[in-house]
Image: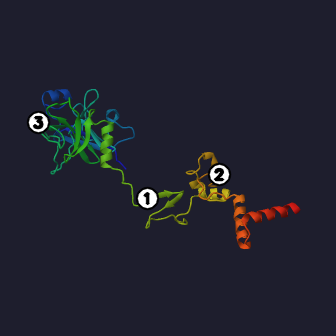
Amino acid sequence: MDVNQFAVYQLKNIPENRQMRFRPYSALQEKGIQIRCRDYEQVYLAQMQPGDGPEQIRKRFERKLPRTFHGHSISVSDVLVLNKAGIVTSYYVEKEGFAVIAGFIRRSSSGALVSFDTAHFHIEGKEGSWLAFDSIIMDGRQFFLMEHEAYGKDAAWVVLDEDGKLIVDNVYQGFDQAVLQQIRDYLNPPEPVNESVQHEIFFGQTSIPSGADTPSGSRQGKPSLENWQKYMENGEYLRSIEGGEEQNYSFIDGNKNNGKKKNSRVSVLKKLRQKQAEIAKRSGKPAQQMEAAEDMERRRK
């Protein structure tokens, strides 16, 4: 379960921070001053309320400061850091609204290949060199938005992790919802499907490989209930194969009666001729005489 928290950061009360205190973000950018967490101190940390965002938190604090709040009222140059659903976002407080700033909170990792200060980085499979200009922390891991140093905004951005692995390619809108979803999928990949147990369907029967678990009370190779019902209705267990051999689907009636017959029926007259020939052979009379004698006998009757 995600714990949604927020923290309030205010500039340390030291002479070095005078040029930054209560200054709008645009003024700091013009002077090339970066907003770094090391210049701030955390004055408050609490759990977020449902529906909380930076504006809601600011208004709530303007009405009344919590007892455990250890700084001055929220003002320009303060930074609100929200950790919502594992995504950490930093907001620079302006006179009206906020400015989202990148790289304020950084994960310290001595073995990281990419950081917020990374430049002239070469990505495998990509031409040219790249620099990091934005970052985000999700589920305790940091990801960086990289820009091509030669083409800038004219080329699509990419997202790398701290190890320099390409996570999202062809990014055009920064860390939008589509990119965040791809990062989530990378962090929480779907479980692989267990292919050790596969079912083979054959004429309505299920064949389960040896060693696989079967439900209690079931019998391997038993036809499905639907086909058993066909057997009971028609008297023959032919419905499952009949459909493939009948010439017309309307002839599916439970009897395999429309296929090619192997043995054609012998006519009654032919059988009679064969019987007469056998009797004539035993009596020593020609078959024609036997036929004439039988004809005379029938006329007497």
Q: Is residue 271 above or below residue 145?
A: below
In space, the residues marked 3 and 1 are separated at their CA atoms by 69 Å
Q: Is residue 111 above or below residue 91?
A: below
Residue 301, position as x, y percentages in the image: 88, 62
- Among numbered discs 3 and 1, the one appearing first in the sequence: 3
> Which labelled disc corresponds to residue 16?
3
> Which labelled disc corresponds to residue 233?
none
In terms of image quadrants, where is residue 80? top left
In space, the residues marked 3 and 2 are separated at their CA atoms by 94 Å
Residue 222, position as x, y percentages in the image: 55, 63
Q: Residue drawn at (63%, 46%), measured in percent from left and top?
A: 250
Q: Is residue 127 above or below residue 271?
A: above
Between tags 3 and 2, which lies in front?
2
Residue closer to the observer: 274 or 205: 274
Q: Residue drawn at (19%, 27%), measured in percent from left and top?
A: 26
> Which labelled disc corresponds to residue 198?
1
In space, the residues marked 2 and 1 are separated at their CA atoms by 32 Å
In screen coordinates, is 238 left or right of 163?
Answer: right
Q: Disc 2 marks which residue?
A: 253
Residue 13 appearing in the image: no
Residue type beneath disc 1: Gln
- Among numbered discs 2 and 1, the one appearing first in the sequence: 1
